[in-house]
Image: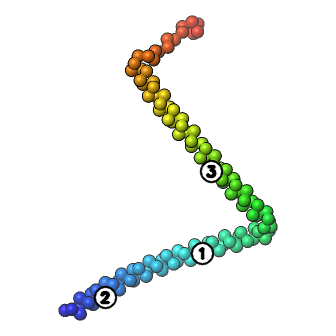
Amino acid sequence: METMQELKSVKAENRKLIEDNNLLFSDCNDLFKENAGLKNIATMFERVVRVLGEDKVFMAVRQDEERERLEAERKRAEQIPKERSVRKNLERAKENVAAREAGKLKKKSKSRDMER
């Protein structure tokens, strides 16, 4: 009886190990595919460096990095005024509601003289 329980637990452990092993093989295959893609990119980069020259390629990379940095700064700078303007609009809206409730805000009458 005891050996049957041990056999069942060993079989269950074996199934678990087989599942884990299959997952590892799958991950390994994915990594091989990704590695092949990265090798292709590296080969293309080396070819570009050989054709254009190392100085031009690295200068272009530095310029693109600077462009990305400036773009990120510009986006950050745009976000700050938007947040402020939203706050200002909210404050103005609260003031308008309070003014209407207090009867301070009067509607402008249309001038009929201008229509003629």
How much space separates mark 3 and mark 2, taking CA atoms?
Answer: 57 Å
Instruction: Pick whichever of labels 3 and 2 is earlier in the sequence.
Output: 2
64 relative to 56 in the view: left or right: left
Whole-percent x, y for residue 93 in the image: 46, 28
Give me the residue at 54% from left, 35% from top. Answer: 85
Left or right: where 73 falls relative to 4: right
Pointer 3: residues within 10 angstroms few (<14), some, or many (20+)? Answer: few
Q: Is residue 14 above or below residue 69?
A: below
Q: Quadrant of residue 43?
A: bottom right
Circle 1: residue type: Asn
What separation in Å lies between label 1 and label 2 (alpha carbons)?
Answer: 37 Å
What residue is shown with label 3?
Answer: 72
Element type at mark 2: helix
Q: Is residue 44 left or right of residue 27?
A: right
Alpha carbons under labels 3 and 1: distance apart = 30 Å
Q: Secondary structure at mark 1?
A: helix
Residue at image coords 43%, 80%: 22
Disc nearest the viewer among 3 and 2: 3
**30 displayed left or right of 52:** left
Q: Position of residue 63 (x, y in %)?
A: 73, 56
**Residue 4 coordinates in the image, percent (x, y):** 23, 91
Against 110, residue 3 (above or below) is below
Judging by the rendered image, the residue that carries numbered circle 2 is 10
Kind of residue sitting beneath label 3? Ala
The image position of residue 44, as x and y in percent, is: 71, 70
Residue at the spot x=57%, y=74% of the render? Answer: 33
